[in-house]
Image (spheres, grey):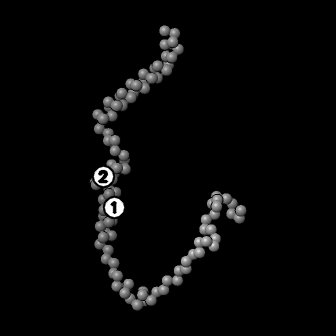
Amino acid sequence: MPTLAKYKNTLIAIVAFCVLYLAYAVLWPMLGFSDAPILEQVATNPQSAQSAKIIEALGKVEKIKFDTAFLDAPEFTSLVDYTEEINKSAEPIVRPNPFAEIGR
């Protein structure tokens, strides 16, 4: 009995934890909460206002007609690409320590 009195608070904590865990295990499914992540619930709910706005915006984008006639125009075909290849071996592009003070 002296051992039981010595560990009384520890035993109370263990019993309380077990009771709370059992209550959680029994009551949580009864309450009908879903185990699915919140993002998954939002993504699968087609009636949400955000989903409706996105679908409406996509519908407007699909209606856009892009005239590609300018691609055959002489002004477009006469454009010249003046880009130059960067010589990567001449100078390092990144600093060894990007957090170091500049000039060191």
Q: Earlier in the sequence, mark 2 or mark 1?
A: 2
Give the residue at x 49% y 16%: 8
Give the residue at x 43% y 26%: 17
Q: In the figure, residue 69 lies in which quadrant? A: bottom left
Give the residue at x 34% y 41%: 35
List x then y, in percent, for residue 28. 33, 34
Q: In the figure, residue 61 lies in which quadrant? A: bottom left
Q: Quadrant of the C terminus?
A: bottom right
Which residue is labeled 1 in the image? Answer: 54
Nearest the camera: 101 or 52? 101
Crowding near the residue tagged with mark 1, few <14, some 14–19, many ≥20 C-alpha atoms within 10 Å:
few
Q: As drawn, is 103 to the left or to the right of 93? A: right
Looking at the picture, which amino acid does disc 1 mark? Ile
Q: As drawn, is 87 to the left or to the right of 59? A: right
Which residue is labeled 2 in the image? Answer: 44
Q: As drawn, is 13 to the left or to the right of 52? A: right
Disc 2 versus disc 1: nearer the observer: 2
